[in-house]
Amino acid sequence: MPKFFLMLGAINTFICIALGAFGAHGLKRILSAEMQVIYHTGVQYHFYHALGLLFIGLLLLHFAKSRLIELSGWLMLLGIILFSVSLYVISLTEIRAIGMMTPFGGLSYLLAWAVLSVAIWKEVKVQD
């Protein structure tokens, strides 16, 4: 599973950079200022959690049997889909009803980090 999350993190980081460049150059004249902000927010949180997926993969190299760390990674991926992708769709289509999914993505992001903190508390043994 570490390899999967490392690969997922790398692919998502690539996607973030591509989407960020596309937004900055290709969409600059197409989207309204408000829609540009929405798009940028999607890219920003997507990027944070793409790096989070890489972090999950690295942790799983050391704590391969931790179901909580793995769950945190799945929650981050779900957050990317529900939060960031919904913002991309809203900004490109201006269909605001899709925004009903966005808070669930934000909740998924929050849960991912909360679960990860519990996992670290349980798994990581610090020597004095």
Image: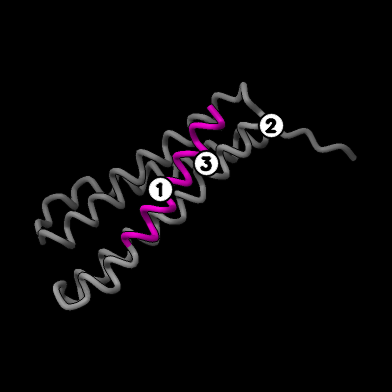
Q: Is residue 3 magenta?
A: yes
Q: Give 124 or 32, whichever is nearer the viewer.
A: 32
Label 3 sits on residue: 114
**Kind of residue sitting beneath label 1:** Asn
Q: Nearer the viewer, mark 3 or mark 1?
A: 1
Label 2 sits on residue: 62
Quarter residue 26 falls in: bottom left
Q: Tell me the number on the disc at residue 40.
A: none
Label whose residue precedes the other's in the sequence (1 or 2):
1
Q: Nearer the viewer, mark 2 or mark 3?
A: 2
- The residue furthest top is 65
**Kind of residue sitting beneath label 3:** Ala
Query: Tag 1's secondary structure?
Result: helix
- Structural crowding at the residue carrying mark 3, measured as other residues with C-alpha within 10 Å and reported as few (<14), some (14–19) or many (≥20): few
Query: Residue 14 placed where, x, y %?
Result: 41, 53
Q: Main secondary structure of the magenta part?
A: helix
Label 1 sits on residue: 12
Query: Tag 2's secondary structure?
Result: helix
Query: Residue 40 placed where, x, y %?
Result: 31, 66
Q: Give 115 or 56, whichever is nearer the viewer.
A: 56
**Kind of residue sitting beneath label 2:** His
Query: Residue 46 placed where, x, y %?
Result: 38, 53
